[in-house]
């Protein structure tokens, strides 16, 4: 589609050549949307976003951000091509302050237009009073805000978030999802999330990934209405 | 006595700090103890000597110091980048922890033997160009405490270098990028930092620190092919006691070792000085395994 910002065609990826974890996945992230990627543990969700960001090996297929082919590029080249990636673990520099972490995002790291620092601090007001504080002292939710804020300052054309609510309290996760919902008009988001119910409340489309393959793509409403899926991923008993 | 112990200790600490700063940076960025570090200091010292001789030596003391400084920087950076390009980069990419340590040992031995082949095994003459250039600068505030012009310059130069390194790492975007690569290279990469470029820069900075240490050894003279290597273990100890990657920690470690060794010498226990200083190190590490300024994992 013309408004696709990120496009994957038949992507095979993993960590050891000959042992693909993701096997033939195609998808696109469109302007103004949140695309949720969900599935059981070991389905290849994190590997897929790592392959897009250049930290896992791409064995076959094509990944493009706008008109830029990302295949074979290094992580820093991919970041500068407009892909903002927030890993699940180790996504902040703990020996630095909040301000220093944010400064690492930009400007000048990406081809896109980054958000201003004031915009990021408006999105995550908790960070405003903690700019000089060491990241080591922050809560898990605040660290996620720093990581996402840093990615936004780099001016990404698309944002990849890997399990942003992992380890967060329900309140912190709620605040984070509310912020993401307001963000999507500015930057489309590919969201990998174990908290499927929360992810589906803010997503525009969702893809079920299982055993390295895209098994189903649908709107959140359609997925929520599917009793088998609801039982498997939402904890709702099958009627 | 106490004044002498402190002043000599501070001087020893300054020399050790010069040797330790680069080692601390390389340990933080590349995650291995670079046992070739001391031999690179030797290369820089001999480079300084060769440069100084070309500039006229004692006939033109100021010019010989300046040319010697430039030659030590060029020699150290060229050798370090060559070692990285030919050996270390490949081994580090393969994550060979033990292999890279052994390779560093081998590079150190290679450099030491190269110095013996080029300049001979004997120690160089103590040129002391600064003593020739500025004897009027010899001023001793205490009768019992004597520091030569060169020794005072080494202390002042070390302090200036520490301030510069601090400003570089804490106040510039380049320093921030270097710290990011040191802490988490994969995350640094996805932030858009060109990690290989920063690693080359880190090696160049390490070599520049070695050059300053080598220049100091040349100015203090005399220098032997083993002079730099003798600094490797105490410098590594200073880095580990202080906490890997911490400038303040490295300086504290160097100060601890420097003053302990100075005290041992002044108290007539010169042969015990390394036992005392390394005993202190063991004590510190038992109390704080991450080092004085190290962050616990």
Image (cartoon, rainbow, N blue to C red):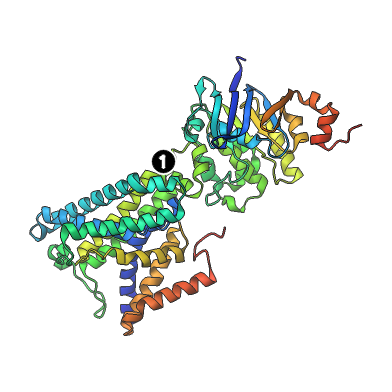
| Most foreground residue, A12 or A125 | A12
Residue shown at the point (37%, 54%) measured from the top left: B103
**Residue A8 in the figure: left or right of residue B37:** right
Against B266, is A174 above or below?
above
Seen as rendered, the residue at the extreme top is A2
Residue A160 at x, y percent in the picture: 61, 33
> In this image, A139 relative to B105: left or right?
right
Q: Residue furthest left?
A: B59
Find residue B278 and report its image quarter.
bottom left
Q: In screen coordinates, is A198 left or right of B142?
A: right
Looking at the image, is A12 positioned above or below residue B184?
above
Q: Nearer the viewer, residue A57 or A46?
A: A57
User: Disc 1 on helix, strand or loop?
Assistant: helix
- Can residue A233 be spotted in the picture? yes
Q: Chain of mark 1?
A: B
Residue that lies at the very extreme toward the front in this rendered image:
A18
Q: Residue at 15% x, 62% y: name it.
A: B129
Q: Nearer the viewer, residue B294 or B151?
A: B294
Tell me which residue sits at (31%, 46%) in the image: B81
Front residue (pair A126, B181): B181
Q: Quadrant of residue B230?
A: bottom left
Label 1 belongs to which residue?
B196
From the viewer's perspective, tell me whether residue A201 is left or right of residue B109.
right
């Amino acid at each position: 589609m013309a408004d696709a910002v990120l496009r994957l065609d038949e992507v095979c990826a993993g960590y050891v050549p000959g042992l693909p974890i993701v096997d033939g996945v195609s998808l696109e992230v469109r302007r103004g949307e949140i695309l949720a990627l969900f599935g059981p543990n070991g389905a290849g969700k994190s590997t897929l976003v790592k392959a897009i960001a250049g930290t896992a090996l791409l064995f076959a297929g094509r990944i493009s951000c706008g008109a830029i082919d990302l295949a074979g590029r290094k992580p820093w080249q991919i970041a500068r091509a407009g892909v903002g990636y927030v890993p699940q673990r180790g996504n902040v520099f703990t020996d630095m302050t909040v301000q220093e972490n944010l400064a690492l995002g930009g400007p000048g790291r990406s081809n896109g237009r980054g958000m201003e620092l004031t915009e990021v601090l408006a999105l995550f007001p908790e960070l405003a009073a903690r700019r000089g504080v060491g990241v080591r002292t922050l809560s898990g939710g605040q660290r996620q805000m720093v990581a996402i804020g840093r990615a936004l300052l780099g001016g990404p054309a698309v944002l990849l978030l890997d399990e942003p609510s992992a380890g967060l309290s329900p309140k912190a996760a709620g605040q984070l999802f509310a912020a993401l919902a307001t963000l999507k008009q500015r930057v489309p988001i590919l969201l990998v999330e174990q908290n499927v119910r929360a992810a589906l409340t803010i997503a525009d489309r969702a893809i079920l990934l299982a055993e390295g393959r895209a098994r189903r793509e649908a709107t959140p409403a359609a997925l929520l209405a599917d009793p088998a899926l609801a039982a498997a991923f939402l904890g709702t008993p099958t009627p | 006595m106490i004044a002498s112990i402190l002043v000599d200790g501070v001087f020893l600490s300054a020399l050790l700090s010069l040797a330790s700063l680069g080692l601390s940076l390389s340990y933080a960025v590349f995650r291995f103890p670079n046992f070739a570090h001391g031999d690179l200091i030797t290369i820089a010292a001999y480079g300084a000597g060769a440069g100084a001789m070309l500039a006229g030596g004692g006939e033109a003391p100021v010019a010989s110091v300046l040319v010697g400084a430039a030659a030590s920087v060029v020699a150290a950076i060229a050798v370090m980048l060559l070692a990285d390009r030919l050996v270390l980069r490949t081994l580090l990419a393969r994550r060979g922890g033990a292999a890279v340590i052994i390779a560093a040992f081998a590079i150190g031995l290679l450099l030491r033997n190269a110095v013996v082949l080029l300049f001979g095994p004997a120690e160089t003459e103590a040129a002391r160009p600064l003593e020739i250039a500025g004897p009027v600068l010899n001023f001793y505030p205490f009768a019992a405490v004597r520091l030569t012009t060169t020794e005072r310059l080494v202390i002042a130069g070390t302090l200036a270098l520490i301030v510069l390194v601090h400003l570089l790492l804490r106040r510039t975007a380049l320093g921030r990028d270097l710290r990011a690569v040191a802490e988490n290279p994969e995350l640094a990469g996805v932030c858009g930092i060109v990690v290989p470029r920063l690693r080359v820069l880190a090696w160049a900075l390490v070599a520049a620190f070695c050059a300053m240490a080598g220049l100091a050894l040349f100015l203090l003279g005399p220098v032997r092919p083993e002079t730099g290597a003798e600094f490797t273990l105490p410098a590594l100890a200073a880095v580990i006691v202080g906490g890997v990657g911490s400038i303040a920690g490295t300086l504290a470690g160097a100060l601890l070792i420097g003053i302990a060794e100075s005290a041992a010498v002044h108290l007539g226990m010169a042969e015990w000085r390394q036992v005392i200083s390394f005993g202190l190190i063991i004590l510190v590490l038992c109390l704080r395994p991450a080092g004085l300024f190290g962050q616990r994992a």
